[in-house]
Image (spheres, rainbow, N blue to C red):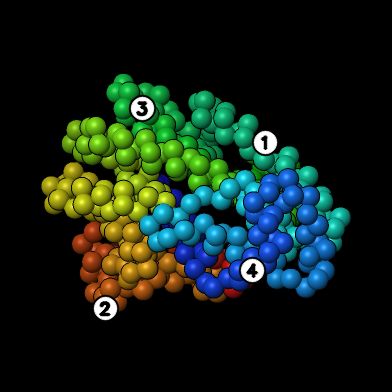
């Protein structure tokens, strides 16, 4: 089930690599002023013929400070990106305003729902039953280190599943504009949690070493890998963990697939060909394709050696995450 996060990340990691326009001065100023970004008339900008989706993507590209250290959106940038994306979806000002109200209410319900799950509320149905199970495992852990690791990994998974949350937060089927607002807020929340997890895990590993399967269990080893996989704003740390995992593959102290996924994650993040075909992007509606490969002819053999299964089956499974792709 941990593969859910990797599958989603394989779509999102390269989602904004296509060229986007630079923000014009008046929007760049909004990116520095949260109050002004909140009050701006985005529907008037749309009426002028501006490509709001492209401008929304341009806000994201401001975070690419350099290849190793992408940063999170600031509050002002989050508002700007969110409002641009929502205005692009809204057919008129009335819908735009209604979307804002619906998204705010859904966000309040999401926060309450997430706090309840993390406090131990049972959840019977997927996808959040998996999160609730991880919360239970964390509560049952007698080692404080493993307890904190599993608790953090559970919250990581809570947020990843938030992209598909339904009746728990939406009283009615959300409009595209309301959903895009919610997703923008969720993205910033995920960045904040990932940052806290990365800093904690870095300090923990420096003090105690990596989580070995024979000592700490497979669940702890995979939870630490998962948090490393999501540490994209700290590429040197990811490379450090990859070096730690490499010798552990042959001794069975880490899963071969975990090493493979992290190798590809780093390679794509550094704009290099990947080895195992785990990372990709949407190229058309319901069509996912892997990023460039080191050895296209030999990739299946490498996947077989590392317990990754068929690339063709993996690609077919990934198509569903491109249902809303618009180019």
Residue for badge 4: 54
Q: Does label 2 or label 1 sit earlier along the sequence?
A: 1
234 vs 173, nearest the viewer: 234
Which x, y percent locates residue 14? 47, 64
Residue in the image at 28% along x and 40% along y: 221
Left or right: where 52 falls relative to 123: right
Q: What label does residue 147 carry, if any?
A: 3
- What residue is at 42 percent from the left and 60 percent from the top? 66
Q: Position of residue 74 (x, y in %)?
A: 58, 48
Disc 2 element: helix
Q: Position of residue 154 (x, y in %)?
A: 44, 36
Mark 1 crowdedness (10 Å alpha carbons): few <14, some 14-19, many ≥20: some
| Secondary element type, mark 3 | helix
Q: Which residue is mark 2?
A: 297
Disc 3, disc 1: CB below 8 Å?
no
Residue picked out by circle 1: 109
Instruction: Please tell me which residue lies in front, 243 or 153.
Output: 243
Q: Residue furthest right?
A: 94
Q: Quadrant of the C terminus?
A: bottom right
In front: label 3 or label 2 = 3
Going from N to C along the chain, the mark reached first, 3 or 2, is: 3
Is residue 155 visible in the rendered structure shown here?
yes
Is tag 4's residue or tag 1's residue first in the polypeptide sequence? 4
């Amino acid at each position: 089930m941990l593969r859910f996060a990797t599958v989603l990340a394989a779509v999102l990691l390269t989602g904004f690599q296509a060229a986007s326009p630079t923000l014009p001065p008046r929007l760049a100023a909004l990116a520095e002023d949260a109050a002004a970004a909140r009050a701006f008339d985005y529907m008037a900008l749309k009426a002028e013929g501006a490509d709001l989706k492209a401008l929304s993507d341009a806000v994201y590209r401001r975070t690419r400070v350099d290849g190793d250290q992408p940063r999170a959106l600031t509050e002002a940038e989050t508002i700007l990106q969110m409002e641009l994306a929502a205005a692009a979806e809204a057919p008129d000002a009335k819908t735009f305003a209604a979307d804002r109200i619906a998204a705010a209410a859904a966000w309040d319900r999401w926060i309450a729902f997430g706090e309840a799950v993390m406090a131990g509320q049972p959840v019977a149905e997927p996808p959040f039953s998996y999160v609730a199970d991880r919360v239970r495992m964390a509560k049952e852990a007698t080692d404080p280190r493993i307890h904190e690791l599993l608790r953090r990994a559970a919250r990581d998974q809570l947020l990843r599943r938030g992209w598909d949350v339904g009746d728990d937060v939406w009283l009615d089927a959300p409009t595209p504009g309301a959903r895009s607002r919610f997703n923008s807020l969720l993205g910033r929340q995920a960045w904040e949690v990932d940052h806290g997890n990365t800093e904690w895990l870095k300090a923990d590993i420096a003090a105690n070493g990596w989580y070995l399967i024979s000592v700490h269990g497979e669940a702890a080893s995979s939870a630490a890998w998962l948090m490393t996989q999501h540490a994209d704003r700290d590429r040197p740390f990811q490379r450090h963990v990859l070096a730690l995992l490499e010798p552990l593959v042959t001794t069975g102290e880490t899963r071969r697939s975990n090493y493979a996924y992290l190798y590809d994650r780093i390679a794509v993040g550094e704009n290099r060909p990947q080895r195992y075909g785990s990372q990709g992007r949407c190229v058309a509606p319901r069509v996912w394709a892997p990023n460039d490969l080191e050895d296209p002819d030999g990739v299946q053999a490498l996947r077989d050696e590392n317990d990754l299964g068929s690339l063709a089956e993996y690609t077919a499974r990934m198509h569903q995450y491109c249902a809303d792709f618009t180019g």
